[in-house]
Image (cartoon, rainbow, N blue to C red):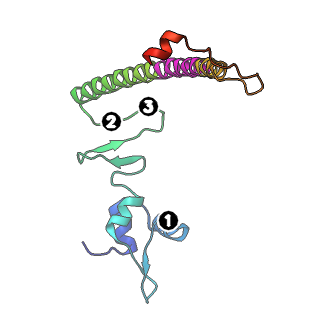
């Protein structure tokens, strides 16, 4: 599609030429200024700034026009079956999110329990290491203690060897 002049753009958008001109001056709408002082406006840029159908409208993905009223209500061109299907899909998504949250909470509790158990095991390991270390020290001879000579062997033991 060829670029539009200011008056053509105003007709296409359903706006006045002055409204289109103010949008160009404010930067809301980009346009190329020709050497003779006129503007050339790309149609896609025009409809980005001024959607077809007038103020407060947007183009839906299905090609239908959706009017967004200014009274705070949600305007839609979707049929009731589509709305029902979307609400059911939303309800399923909410249930899945709740289930995922419950699983995450359960896992957090499991992790906390495992950390407590690990701390207990570490403490028990330290205690056992301390006990074993003390027993090892008790079985080693004390270097300060006097050496006890071995008991003499009996005659019979010396004979048998």
On the image, the x and y values in percent for residue 17 come to: 44, 68
Q: Which residue is mark 1?
A: 23
Q: CA distance from mark 3 to mark 2?
A: 10 Å
First in residue order: circle 1 vs circle 3: 1
Q: Which residue is mark 2?
A: 76
Q: Which residue is found at the position 48% from the left and 10% from the top?
A: 156
On the image, the x and y values in percent for residue 120 come to: 57, 17
Q: CA distance from mark 2 to mark 1?
A: 28 Å
The residue range painted magenta reads 108-126
Q: Say which quadrant the N terminus sits in.
A: bottom left
Res 73 label: 3
Q: Is residue 79 left or right of residue 41?
A: left
- Neighbor class of circle 1 (other Cα within 10 Å; few <14, some 14-19, many 20+) is some
Mark 2 falls on what kind of element? Answer: loop
Tell me where residue 93 sits by quadrant.
top left
Q: Are marks 1 and 3 in contact (CB under 8 Å)?
A: no
Query: Looking at this view, is 106 or 10 the one in front?
Result: 106
């Amino acid at each position: 599609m060829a670029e539009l002049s200011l008056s053509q753009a105003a007709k296409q958008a359903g706006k006045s030429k002055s409204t289109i001109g103010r949008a160009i001056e404010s930067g809301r709408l980009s346009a190329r200024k020709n050497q003779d002082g006129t503007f050339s406006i790309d149609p896609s840029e025009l409809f980005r700034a001024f959607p077809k159908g007038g103020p407060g409208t947007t183009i839906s993905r299905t090609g239908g026009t959706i009017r967004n009223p200014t009274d705070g209500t949600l305007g839609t061109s979707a049929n009731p079956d589509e709305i029902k299907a979307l609400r059911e899909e939303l309800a399923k998504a909410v249930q899945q999110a709740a289930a995922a949250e419950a699983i995450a909470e359960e896992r957090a509790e499991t992790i906390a329990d495992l950390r407590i158990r690990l701390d207990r095991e570490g403490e028990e390991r330290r205690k056992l290491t301390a006990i074993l270390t003390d027993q090892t020290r008790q079985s080693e001879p004390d270097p300060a203690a006097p050496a006890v000579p071995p008991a003499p062997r009996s005659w019979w033991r010396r004979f048998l060897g």
